[in-house]
Each structure stands twice: as C-alpha cells, then as structure tokens.
Amino acid sequence: MMRRKGHRPEVPGGRAIHTPLALAAFDRQIAGCTAEPALRSVLRRSLGPSRYTVVPAMHFGLAARAYLHFTSPIRRYADLSVHRALKQYLRGRRDFVHEDPTVEQLGVHLNERSRTASRAEKDRHRVLDARVMASHVGRELTGRITRVRPSGLLVQLDGMLVEANLPADSLPDGPYQPDPRETSLVSASRTFTIGMPLQVRVASTDEQHGRVELALVG
C-alpha cells in the first residue's frame, strides 16, 4: 500500500514488517506524508485489541515482554482489581492468578465490559459528528479515503476529526467491488484507493443513527 503511494518502506535489519521495531520504523517513515492519516488508520486497525488475561504476554506496541495496564488514581473497576492483585503479590502471595479461576473469569468480564464501553464511546462520537456536520450540509470539502468497505468508502475530512460515508452506489462508473484486501474499491473503469484525496460534498446527516453521508464532486 505504501509503495502505491510512492513510499518504499525500509525495514531495519531485514526484519518482518510485523515486528515492533519494523512498525516503529514504518511509523517514522509515514510521518508528514500526505497519506499519513489514512496509513495510520490502516495501521491502527491492523493491531489487535488489548485484553486482560492470566497468561503473561508481550505488549506488541511497547515491545515489552511483560506488561500490565492500570491507572493511578483508580478510574475503573479494572484498575481496582489490578491494584488489589499487586498488593497481594507484594505481600508475598504467588498462587492467586494461575490457581484461582475467579481471576480468569474476572479478566473475561473486564474484556467484555471494555468492548461494550468502547462501542458506546464510538457510537457517541458518531452522533456528535453528525450533530456538528448538520450545519455543513451542502458544503464542499476535501478529504482522504481511510477505509474501503463493500458498501462504500470512509473518508476523513481535512481539518476535521470526522469520518463520513461515501456510498458505493452513489459513485459514477459503477458498480464497484472491494479488492481482496479491501484497500481499493474497483469498477471496470475506475479505482478508489485508501489514501486517495477526494473532493466531496456533505449530502446529509442523521444524528439519531450517527451518520454523515457524502457525495463525490466531479
């Protein structure tokens, strides 16, 4: 994808691109390029979600062999649970994680609640985006494609932290289908690729469902 944008990713020491060092180098290389927002969006989606588990595991982004997330002061139930576990460990207890099934069950519960909270946060952001963009209906703006889906394109508007939908059935020269990697939306005569700049018009907003819909200009 970077090569299609005119960049040649250099991986230190010939390492695979999926290692922490390689991704850190990738991050530095895309800094300041015109397609940076779109490439960062793809990079974020390529990283799996974090989760609580009783099995020690590496933190990929930090390249740390052992990692445990918590905040201080306590802000969430997960933080309270971690604080309690750390205090027990400092007092000399060593068997409470691997031999206590309630700890594993707690991790599963915390992961489920975290995903629920994350979905609620994203839904709220979309509602607020639609509310803000309601006053921009009819306005022409520039943006870049950040995601390709069978239903159309997701476009991040320049100068705004807003991603809006550009439906595939509204695009000229259709019909369109995503390529196997979902990095491009392709028809017989035209291709839209992640990172591509577009001139768009805000066609409509739906605050109740948190949707901002665009139309292609030109």
Image (cartoon, rainbow, N blue to C red):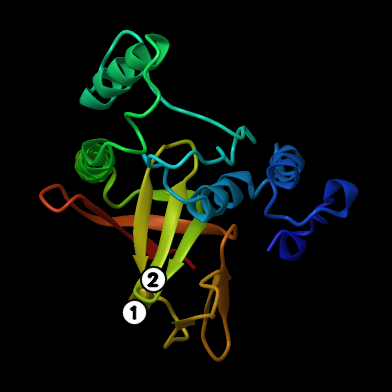
Q: Is residue 95 above or below residue 148?
A: above
Between tags 2 and 1, which lies in front? 2
The residue under the point 42% across, 37% down is 160
The residue positioned 40% from the left and 24% from the top of the image is 94
Place of residue 79 in the rendered image (x, y in percent of width and height, measured from the top left):
29, 21
Q: Are marks 2 and 1 in contact (CB under 8 Å)?
A: yes
Residue 128 percent location from the top left of the image = 22, 37
Q: Residues within 10 Å of mark 2 (few under 14, many from 20)?
A: many
Mark 2 belongs to which amino acid?
Gly
Q: Position of residue 179 (x, y in %)?
A: 54, 80
Of mark 2 and mark 1, the one earlier in the sequence is 2
Residue at 26% x, 49% y is 137
Quadrant of image for the N terminus:
bottom right
**Is 109 left or right of 215, judged from the image as shown?**
left
Q: Which residue is nearer to you in this view: 183 or 81?
A: 81
What is the quadrant of residue 189 in the picture? bottom right
Q: Quadrant of residue 54?
A: top left
Secondary structure at badge 2 equals strand
User: Label 2 to label 1, Cα distance in Å?
Assistant: 8 Å
Q: Secondary structure at mark 1?
A: helix
Q: Which mark, by number, is residue 159?
A: none
Looking at this view, is 189 or 181 the one in front?
Answer: 181
Report the amino acid beneath label 1. Asp
Residue 175: give x, y in percent of width and height: 42, 88
Q: Nearer the viewer, residue 86 or 167?
A: 86
Residue that badge 1 annotates:
169
Left or right: residue 131 compared with residue 89: left
From this viewpoint, is residue 133 visible?
no
* Residue on which the image places disc 2: 152
